[in-house]
Amino acid sequence: MNAKIRFWLSLYCFCVLTTDALAEETFHPSRMRFLVHGGYQLTEDLNLRIHFIPAGNLIGPVAPIIHPGLGIKLASWLEMEAVAGWCFATDNPLFSLRVTPTLGDFYAWLDGEYQYPSQNFYWFVQAEYKILDWLQAGVEGEGWGDFKDAPWSNGGGPNLLLRLNHIGADFSLHTRELRGVIKPEFFLRVHVFL
C-alpha cells in the first residue's frame, strides 16, 4: 500500500478513535425520542388527547408508552391535562398530571408521571419564549427514578423548539447526573401532531 495512503488512513483512524473516546468521556450517550400527538375538541374548554411514544428512546431498548388524556382549560392562562396510560417496559399503568400556564409569548409545561406498582416516577418541566410562530427557546429539566431503591437521574439545560405545521423538533443540551456521573448529553425529540 502506498505510504501516503497508509499515513492518511492511520491519521483518520486515530482521529475517529480519539473523537469517540473523547465523546464517551465527555458526554453521556445522546437520546432521541419520537412522539405522536392527537386530539379531539369536545367543548370550548375540554378536549380528548392521546400521546404515543413508539419507543422511549429510539437509540435504546425502552418499550412504547401510550398516554390518553383529558385537557381542561381552567382559565385563559392555565390549562391542565389528566392522563391515565400504559408503560409497556414495566407493564404498569401510569398516571400523569400536566399543567401549562401561559402569559403572552411565555409559557411553561410541567409533567409528573407515576407508575404503579413499580413506583417509577418521571418528571419534565420546560419554560419557553415564543420568538416566531415556528421557533421557541427556553430551558427544561427532566428526571426519572423510583421510590424504592433504584438511583435517580436528573438533568436539564437550554433548548430550541421548532414547530412546522404537523411536525416539530426539540433540540436540547442537558447536564445530567446518571449513575453518579455528571456529564452533558444531547436530547432530540421529534413530534408529529395529528
Image (cartoon, rainbow, N blue to C red):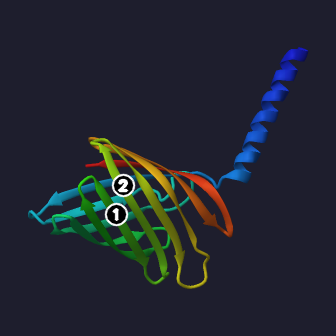
Relative to 63, does residue 7 appear above or below in the rendering? above
Residue bearing mark 1? 109
Marks 2 & 1, CB-CB < 8 Å contact: yes
Q: Nearer the viewer, residue 58 or 72?
A: 72
If you read the primary sequence from the N terminus, does the residue marked by circle 2 or circle 1 appear first?
A: 1
Image coords of residue 150 (percent x, y):
60, 78
Residue 1 in sight here: no
Which residue shows up at 82% across the image and 28% down it? 11
Q: Nearer the viewer, residue 118 or 177?
A: 177
Relative to 87, does residue 51 appear above or below in the rendering? above
Which residue shows up at 57% across the image and 56% down it? 60
Residue 183 in sight here: yes
Image coords of residue 57 (percent x, y):
51, 56
Q: Is residue 100 left or right of residue 21?
A: left
Q: Is residue 38 left or right of residue 171?
A: left
Image coords of residue 30 (percent x, y):
58, 51
Amino acid bearing label 2: Glu
Residue 42 picture quarter: bottom left
